[in-house]
Image: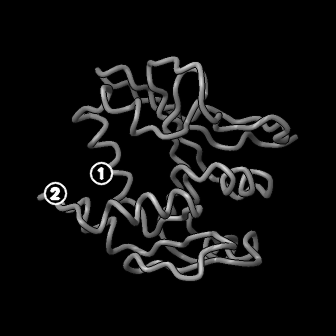
Amino acid sequence: MSRIVATEYVSLDGVFEEPGQWSFPFWSDEAAKFKYDELMASDAQLLGRKTYEGFAAAWPTMTDEAGFSDRMNGMPKYVVSTTLKTADWNNSHLIQSNVVEEIAKLRDAPGRDILLAGSAQLLSTLLEHNLVDELRLMLHPIVLGYGAKLFEDGIDTRTWKLSGTQVFDSGIVVLHYEPAPTE
């Protein structure tokens, strides 16, 4: 069985929107290693439409010696969208209906982690249906004061258990959470 692991860049005030505009000053070798190790330990990516469109516009032209871009471009990508007609980025597959059931099938298949990045609406749906096995929050030491929050008002209350932390010299703290056992 695979695990769905959601990793999200967030500010101290909970903003996750457009992290490329505010997270760069905190990027470091430690953050790069974390993202590299995470990607190499996974078999696939799960993306909402907006995140997919941003990734698909950027990654196909990127190269690096470590193999990160080759992995990003080559691995299976499952894109949840009711509006896209095609997903042309290499090895991308559209999920247009029965989203919860299709993702549950992916999760139930043998394999390693399935990564979810960004994709707040998709994350909310997966949380609602208890399909997230680990939530990794890359908390950045900045208060933005504006922007879309990762968790919108009205989401169901759910308790999570802190399963690990990583602190980077740049000030990023990665909080690893797993669903808390229900009583």
Query: What residue lies at 48% left-to-right and 63% top-to-bottom?
Result: 53
Q: Residue furthest left?
A: 65
Q: Are marks 2 and 1 in contact (CB under 8 Å)?
A: yes
Query: What residue lies at 81% left-to-right and 41% top-to-bottom?
Result: 155
Query: What residue lies at 38% left-to-right and 73% top-to-bottom?
Result: 75
Q: Is residue 108 left or right of residue 77?
A: right
Q: Is residue 147 above or below residue 142?
A: below
Q: Is residue 153 left or right of residue 40?
A: right
> How crowded is the residue under tag 1: few (<14 C-alpha within 10 Å), some, or many (20+)?
some
Q: Position of residue 40 (x, y in %)?
A: 33, 60
> How crowded is the residue under tag 2: few (<14 C-alpha within 10 Å), some, or many (20+)?
few
Q: Is residue 39 left or right of residue 63?
A: right
Q: Distance from label 2 to label 1 (Cα)?
A: 9 Å
The total of numbered circles placed on residues is 2
Q: Amino acid at mark 1?
A: Tyr
Residue 66 is marked as: 2
Q: Quadrant of residue 151?
A: top right
Could you say which is closer to the camera, residue 61 or residue 69? 61
Q: Position of residue 76 (x, y in %)?
A: 44, 75
Q: Is residue 161 above or below residue 69?
A: above
Disc 1 on helix, strand or loop? Answer: helix
Disc 2 on helix, strand or loop? Answer: loop
Q: Is residue 180 left or right of residue 173?
A: right
Q: Position of residue 103 (x, y in %)?
A: 66, 71
Query: What residue lies at 52% left-to-right and 26% top-to-bottom?
Result: 11
Could you say which is closer to the camera, residue 76 or residue 109? 76
Q: Quadrant of residue 64?
A: bottom left
Q: Amino acid at mark 2?
A: Ala
Residue 86 is marked as: none
- Label 1 sits on residue: 36
